[in-house]
Image (spheres, rainbow, N blue to C red):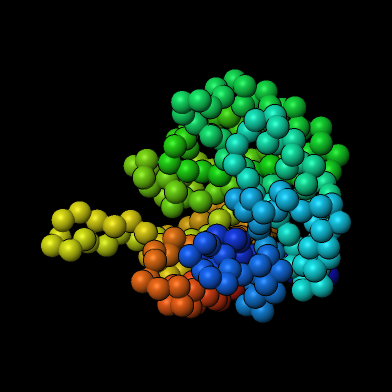
């Protein structure tokens, strides 16, 4: 008897609509519109990530947003930054209200932030709720916290519901090679952010710009990432993001942003494998 086909969890994010909902847009797109457009493009997940307005919704409004997503075949995820007791607690409350099963955050690092011992304590404190609600808490890779330190934190906590939101592009600014980041983080990955990236020469060949690239045209080794992480096999969502630079005016920028999103979704569907 053949095995049932595993679901491809493929989504977009508020970061895929970064310019379209920004203050530069005189008519910013709403969350509902982002969900609808994502569905039309072929996505079945949507991550509301670093989007402060979500915190202003009443319980009824949050639940209505979930219902709207369900009507469009789109499962919602949440994303925030920080590990303070207050921050984790408030987003756990929101995740419970919305029935969200994936919560992305970031371990903030530097002056004025809590040390890693307190971060670990705060994370351990929410584990009972993660277990009871079936929520995965995934901390994103980024340049302010080296990957080795993040992995050590996850290994020390040692719980299946606490892992990593893998985005190797973020770590290049800390002089980490994307392949090394993928290899180190793959065993602990619970959420995958997919964006391509590239270097381009500045005018006069003085320095480089490090920014986003259309999916499949930059330096991301997507095949290696998928081989290492095995997202479909593990039920991990792949969330499309961009580092699209401003294109001179809002109309051109939003049009290219939409184009990149569709190209990313199409690329993943053509090239991902179990």
Specify the quadrant of the image occupied by residue 227: bottom right
Q: Residue at image x 84%, y 52%?
A: 59
Q: Residue at image x 82%, y 73%?
A: 71
**Residue 239 horizontal side relative to residue 56, left or right:** left
The correct choice, above or below, for 158 with respect to 249 in the image is above
Which one is in front, 217 or 85? 85
The correct choice, above or below, for 266 with respect to 182 in the image is below
The correct choice, above or below, for 137 with respect to 3 in the image is above
Which one is in front, 134 or 186? 134
Specify the quadrant of the image occupied by residue 115: top right
**The N terminus - image quarter:** bottom right
- Residue 29 in picture, x, y percent from top left: 61, 70
- Residue 44 in picture, x, y percent from top left: 70, 69
- Residue 43 in picture, x, y percent from top left: 66, 71
- Residue 30 in picture, x, y percent from top left: 66, 67
Q: Residue at image x 60%, y 36%?
A: 82
**Residue 25 horizontal side relative to residue 230, left or right:** left
Viewer can see residue 71: yes
């Amino acid at each position: 008897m053949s095995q049932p086909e595993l679901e491809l969890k493929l989504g977009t994010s508020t970061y895929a609509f970064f310019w379209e909902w920004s203050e530069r847009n005189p008519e910013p797109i709403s969350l509902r519109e982002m969900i609808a457009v994502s569905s039309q493009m072929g996505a079945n997940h949507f991550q509301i990530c670093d989007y402060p307005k979500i915190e202003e919704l009443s319980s009824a409004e949050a639940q209505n947003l979930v219902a709207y997503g369900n009507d469009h075949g789109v499962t919602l995820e949440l994303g925030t930054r920080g590990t303070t007791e207050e921050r984790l607690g408030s987003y756990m409350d929101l995740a419970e209200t919305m029935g969200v099963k994936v919560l992305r955050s970031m371990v903030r690092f530097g002056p004025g932030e809590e040390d890693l011992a307190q971060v670990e304590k705060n994370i351990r404190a929410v584990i009972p709720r993660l277990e009871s609600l079936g929520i995965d808490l995934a901390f994103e890779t980024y340049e302010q916290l080296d990957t080795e330190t993040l992995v050590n934190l996850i290994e020390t906590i040692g719980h299946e519901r606490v892992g990593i939101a893998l985005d190797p592009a973020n770590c290049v600014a800390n002089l980490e090679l994307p392949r090394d980041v993928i290899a180190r983080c793959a065993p602990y990955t619970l959420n995958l952010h997919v964006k391509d990236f590239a270097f381009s020469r500045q005018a006069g060949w003085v320095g480089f710009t490090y920014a986003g690239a259309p999916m499949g045209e930059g330096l991301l080794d997507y095949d290696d990432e998928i081989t290492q992480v095995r997202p479909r096999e593990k039920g991990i969502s792949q969330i499309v993001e961009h580092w699209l630079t401003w294109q001179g005016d809002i109309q051109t920028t939003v049009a290219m942003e939409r184009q990149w999103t569709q190209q990313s979704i199409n690329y993943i569907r053509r090239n991902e494998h179990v």
